[in-house]
Amino acid sequence: MVKITEYKNGLKVVSDKHDGVRSVSVGFWFGAGSGFESEENNGISHFTEHVTFKGTEKYSAFEIAKLFEDYGASINAFTSKEATCYYFKCIDENFEKCFALMSHILYESSFRDEELDKERNVIIEEINMVADEPEDICYDRLAEKTYVGTALARTILGPKENVSRFNRNDVLSYTKKMYTPDNTVISVVGNVSEMELNSVVEKYVLPNCSTEKCDKVYAPQVFGNGFIKYEKDFEQVNLAIAFGSLPFEHELSATQSVVSFCLGTGMSSRLFQVLREQKGLVYNVYTSCSSYYNNGIFGIYLNTSGKNLFSAVESVRDEINKVLMNGITAEEIERAKMQIKSNTLFALENTLSTMSSYGKYALYTGKAYDVDKKLAELQGVTTEKALAFCNNYFDCNNLSISYVGKASHIKEMDLVRDFFK
């Protein structure tokens, strides 16, 4: 049973004991990301995530890595637009050792100047790598267009010039502001008792975390429609088509998931069957819904060649129009519901994926994730609800498109104006 405990300082711990496994997955979730940054400090969340592992007064970066490996644990972290997560997975007998080490890193990192200098070079190489990845560029440009005027429009990595000048004081100021107890969720899934979990939290976290309160402000709801392009001599065209859609934990989220599956998830989906299997226009096409606290998009992504670009866009437009005119069949709805249900239940067998779901949900909502409630909402999706969702959100006046590819393929075209108006 999923349980959430809130301490007096605002720290939340969400847990789910799995007796049938010998592993434990733990994630320290902070409500920190590029969505809370300014132009001047864009990239500081990701920079902080990297340098947190670079040593404390007690352990060097090498010793930290070695200790986790001595315990047989895997460790990693990631930064998104509205969350940063540090996590590990270990066997149950080493849970306290790993928890103590992770807590020590998070609350006692030294952020030495020489270590920051080394890591900033690594991050700049990461930025350079993304500049050669057309799919990543496409996503970043789409965010720039759809979330225009808000921090969500900025990249997670930030610009090189920011990364080049971040220093120890910047990181300390940022962690003091954002890594506060009331902006933290610890998610724990696996073979660990509630008593043991409460013990390690009281021993390793509560005495060390700050007493500050976080005053972060989420980006307001916004959707900037229109066309944006990034011209570079990539062989393939990457395209993202997005409708403004649902924020996190919306009452129509289950309906959106079903529509997404029917339209572009899996090999039986309409877009995959038409664009790839029947017409051979794309290498890949899929739908993906991303959601934040106040914002969300329903996205359609495809990879194609320059010569097939316009035919592919026309085909996407035609499939959307078919859905708007005729809806989605009951057979498609039932297949989608079964696949989503299966994927949900399969994920519960993996402590790491379950930890991630529970941690993110608690961070956004302050509540414990209820899988039975989610499955009931899924079961309640009907053809009528799916059609109503499509009619409400597949609005071509609320559409943005991001193009990444050669200038010669696109010329003076505006894909929104010329195909969807």
Image (tube, grey):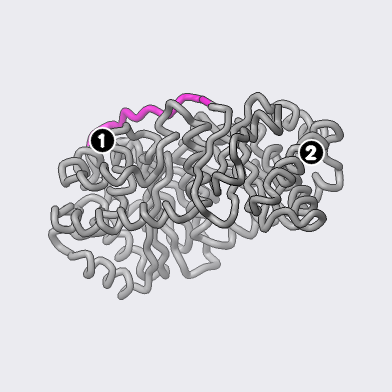
Q: Residue at x 79, y 38 (%)?
A: 318
From the image, tell me which residue sits under label 2.
318
Image quarter of the C terminus? top right
Q: Earlier in the sequence, mark 2 or mark 1?
A: 1
Image position of 247 with respect to 112: above or below: above
Label of residue 157 in the image: none
Q: Position of residue 336 (x, y in %)?
A: 76, 49
Q: SS for tag 1?
A: helix
Question: Is residue 24 at all visible to an observer of this figure?
Answer: yes
Q: Position of residue 83 (x, y in %)?
A: 41, 43
Image position of 260 with respect to 126: above or below: above
Image position of 73 with respect to 42: above or below: below
Q: Position of residue 113 (x, y in %)?
A: 14, 53
Q: Residue at x 40, y 41 (%)?
A: 155
Q: Is residue 248 magenta?
A: no
Q: SS for tag 2?
A: helix
From the image, tell me which residue sits under label 1.
177
Question: Alpha-carbon distance for marks 2 and 1?
Answer: 48 Å
Which region shows up in magenta?
Answer: 211-222
Callout 1: few (<14), some (14-19), or many (20+) C-alpha neighbours within 10 Å? Answer: some
The amino acid marked with disc number 1 is: Lys
Q: Residue at x 36, y 34 (%)?
A: 36
Image-quadrant location for residue 117: bottom left
Is the stretch drawn in magenta largely helix, strand or loop? loop
